[in-house]
């Protein structure tokens, strides 16, 4: 609707879904975790026993709340620390407030026993999705929880306002930043287990649809704003 308001011809607008869902479908058809994440990616922290379940955390700063990023991450760290579940934690992006998030993590590690946590900088997309698919829950505010995890059926605890206004599947529980809220939501999602795949962001055929459209449709350049 927004693209059409910007002047695009309605007949030239196609809803195909998100191409990353195509990759998520490939992950569903493969082994959940067929590589040693610690040997392949290193990271910081002890090698964890993942055989009895684990959770993944990816929490970025919110640019409009950058001055609160350290407090936000402290609440999440406290919740994960108290739950004492093996946790694979991914470093935040470099948005405004990232210094507060990073410092919060470093200080918490210095002051607490974080033997249930292992930290990573990054990971290849297919390996990351395999890691998510094999997890009990994703915690944080990453868009992967809204998009790919919906299709994979991975339970998600979405913290704060970063994904506000985006459609989400039945796999997502939204919480505030408090330790208590986050803890309760994680326990609820682990108890529920995986959800049925939700096609809210595509049916895993986006790549084929886009290729076919680009192969057949003539490009147009004349556009007029409708507002």
Image: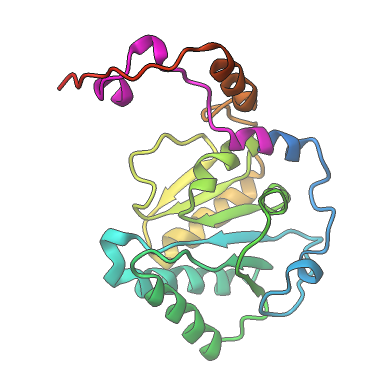
2 falls in the magenta region: yes
Q: Is residue 161 left or right of residue 57?
A: left
Where residue 29 appears, as percent x and y from the top left, is 79, 35
**Quarter of the figure with the N terminus:** top left
Q: Residue at x 77, y 75 (%)?
A: 47
Looking at the image, which residue is at 50% across and 83% down? 106
Residue 92 position within the rendered picture, expressed as x and y whole percent measured from the top left: 49, 66
Q: Is residue 223 above or below residue 139?
A: above
Where's the C terminus, which quadrant?
top left
Q: Nearer the viewer, residue 34 or 23?
A: 23
Above/below status of 142 relative to 223: below
Q: Is residue 57 magenta?
A: no
User: Eyeballing the image, is 26 above or below 207?
Assistant: below
- Above-or-below relation of 211 to 115: above
**Which residue occupies the foreground of this view, 196 or 14?**
14
Q: Nearer the viewer, residue 20 or 177?
A: 20
Which residue is found at the position 65% from the left and 38% from the top? Answer: 152
Does 96 sit left or right of 81 as displayed? left
Write the residue at 53% across / 27% down.
17
- Range shown magenta: 1-23
* The residue positioned farthest toward the left in the image shown: 227
Q: Quadrant of residue 62?
A: bottom left
Q: Given the current orientation, which residue lies at the most extreme bottom position?
A: 111
Q: Position of residue 87 (x, y in %)?
A: 65, 67
Q: In the drawing, does residue 112 fall left or right of residue 117?
A: left
Q: Going by the image, does 167 lie left or right of 122?
A: left
């Amino acid at each position: 609707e927004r693209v059409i308001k910007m002047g695009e011809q309605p007949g030239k607008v196609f809803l195909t879904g998100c191409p990353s869902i195509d990759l998520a479908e490939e992950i569903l058809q493969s082994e959940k975790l067929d590589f040693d994440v610690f040997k392949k990616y290193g990271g910081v922290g002890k090698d964890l026993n993942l055989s009895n379940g684990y959770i993944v955390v990816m929490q970025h700063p919110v640019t409009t709340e950058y001055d609160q990023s350290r407090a936000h991450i402290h609440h999440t760290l406290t919740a994960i620390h108290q739950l004492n579940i093996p946790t694979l934690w991914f470093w935040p992006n470099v948005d405004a407030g990232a210094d507060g998030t990073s410092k919060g993590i470093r200080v918490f590690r210095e002051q607490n026993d974080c033997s249930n946590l292992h930290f990573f900088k990054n990971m290849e997309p297919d390996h990351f999705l395999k890691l998510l698919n094999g997890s009990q829950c994703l915690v944080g505010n990453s868009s992967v929880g809204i998009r790919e995890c919906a299709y994979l059926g991975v339970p998600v605890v979405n913290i704060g306002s970063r994904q506000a206004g985006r459609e989400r599947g039945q796999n997502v529980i939204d919480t505030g930043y408090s330790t208590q809220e986050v803890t309760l939501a994680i326990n609820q999602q682990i108890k529920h287990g995986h959800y049925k795949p939700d096609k809210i962001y595509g049916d895993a055929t986006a790549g084929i649809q886009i290729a076919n459209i680009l192969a057949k449709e003539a490009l147009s350049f004349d556009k007029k704003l409708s507002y």
